[in-house]
Amino acid sequence: MPTYDYHCESNGRTVEVKHAMSEKVRTWGELCTLAGLPLESTPADAPVAKQLAAASIGGGIKAPSAPMPSGGGCGVGCGHKH
Protein backbone atom coordinates (compact mmCIF):
# COMPACT_ATOMS: atom_id res chain seq x y z
CA MET A 1 0.00 0.00 0.00
CA PRO A 2 1.42 3.45 -0.88
CA THR A 3 2.62 5.88 1.79
CA TYR A 4 1.69 9.56 1.55
CA ASP A 5 2.63 12.70 3.48
CA TYR A 6 -0.10 15.22 4.27
CA HIS A 7 0.45 18.73 5.62
CA CYS A 8 -2.01 20.70 7.73
CA GLU A 9 -1.60 24.49 7.50
CA SER A 10 -3.74 24.99 10.62
CA ASN A 11 -1.27 23.27 12.95
CA GLY A 12 1.88 23.11 10.80
CA ARG A 13 2.15 19.32 11.11
CA THR A 14 3.03 16.83 8.39
CA VAL A 15 1.82 13.26 8.90
CA GLU A 16 2.72 10.11 6.96
CA VAL A 17 -0.05 7.56 6.35
CA LYS A 18 -0.64 4.49 4.19
CA HIS A 19 -3.83 4.17 2.20
CA ALA A 20 -5.20 2.98 -1.12
CA MET A 21 -4.41 5.13 -4.15
CA SER A 22 -8.13 5.63 -4.72
CA GLU A 23 -8.72 7.02 -1.21
CA LYS A 24 -8.92 10.80 -0.80
CA VAL A 25 -7.88 12.46 2.46
CA ARG A 26 -9.11 16.04 2.69
CA THR A 27 -9.33 16.96 6.38
CA TRP A 28 -7.33 16.74 9.60
CA GLY A 29 -10.04 14.51 11.09
CA GLU A 30 -9.76 12.00 8.21
CA LEU A 31 -5.97 12.07 8.49
CA CYS A 32 -6.02 11.51 12.26
CA THR A 33 -8.39 8.57 11.84
CA LEU A 34 -6.04 6.92 9.32
CA ALA A 35 -2.92 7.63 11.38
CA GLY A 36 -4.48 6.78 14.75
CA LEU A 37 -3.72 10.25 16.12
CA PRO A 38 -5.82 12.42 18.45
CA LEU A 39 -7.29 15.62 17.00
CA GLU A 40 -5.92 17.70 19.89
CA SER A 41 -6.81 21.37 19.37
CA THR A 42 -6.98 21.27 15.56
CA PRO A 43 -10.53 21.29 14.13
CA ALA A 44 -11.51 18.03 12.43
CA ASP A 45 -12.57 19.95 9.31
CA ALA A 46 -9.19 21.71 8.90
CA PRO A 47 -7.98 21.01 5.34
CA VAL A 48 -4.86 18.95 4.64
CA ALA A 49 -2.82 18.84 1.46
CA LYS A 50 -1.00 15.85 0.03
CA GLN A 51 2.69 16.61 -0.37
CA LEU A 52 4.04 16.48 -3.90
CA ALA A 53 6.83 14.01 -3.10
CA ALA A 54 6.53 10.66 -4.81
CA ALA A 55 4.68 8.01 -2.86
CA SER A 56 6.62 4.96 -1.82
CA ILE A 57 5.27 1.46 -2.11
CA GLY A 58 6.22 -1.27 0.29
CA GLY A 59 8.30 0.89 2.58
CA GLY A 60 10.91 2.30 0.27
CA ILE A 61 11.33 0.52 -3.02
CA LYS A 62 13.94 2.42 -5.01
CA ALA A 63 14.78 2.33 -8.69
CA PRO A 64 18.14 0.70 -9.38
CA SER A 65 21.00 3.15 -9.77
CA ALA A 66 22.57 3.50 -13.17
CA PRO A 67 26.35 3.14 -13.20
CA MET A 68 28.31 6.36 -13.62
CA PRO A 69 29.93 6.63 -17.05
CA SER A 70 33.69 6.27 -17.10
CA GLY A 71 36.00 9.11 -18.14
CA GLY A 72 34.17 11.85 -16.24
CA GLY A 73 31.57 12.41 -18.97
CA CYS A 74 27.86 12.49 -18.42
CA GLY A 75 26.93 9.90 -21.01
CA VAL A 76 25.24 10.04 -24.38
CA GLY A 77 22.49 12.59 -24.96
CA CYS A 78 23.15 14.88 -22.00
CA GLY A 79 23.99 17.89 -24.15
CA HIS A 80 27.51 18.18 -22.71
CA LYS A 81 30.25 18.47 -25.34
CA HIS A 82 32.96 15.84 -24.91
Image: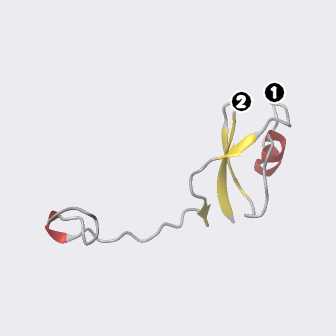
> Along the line of sight, which residue is nearer the eye, 3 or 71?
71
Q: Are marks 2 and 1 in contact (CB under 8 Å)?
A: yes
* Callout 1: SS: loop
Horizontal side, residue 5 vs residue 35: left or right = left
Residue at far top of view: 41
Amino acid on which disc 1 is placed: Ser
Q: Residues within 10 Å of mark 2 (few under 14, many from 20)?
A: few
Q: Quadrant of the C terminus?
A: bottom left
- Residue at the spot of label 2: 11
Q: Residue at x 79, y 44 (%)?
A: 32
Residue 55: percent from the left, percent from the top? 60, 59
The residue wearing badge 1 is 41
**Left or right of 38 in this view: 55:** left
Q: Closer to the camera, 28 or 47? A: 47
Query: What residue sits 53% from the left and 67% below the top?
Result: 61
Q: Position of residue 46 (x, y in %)?
A: 80, 35
Can you give x and y, in whole percent of width and height, for residue 79 in the image?
26, 63
Q: Earlier in the sequence, mark 2 or mark 1?
A: 2
- The type of residue carrying mark 2 is Asn
Residue 8: give its label.
Answer: none
| Real-space Cα separation, disc 2 to disc 1, in angstroms | 9 Å
Q: Is residue 28 above or below residue 43?
A: below
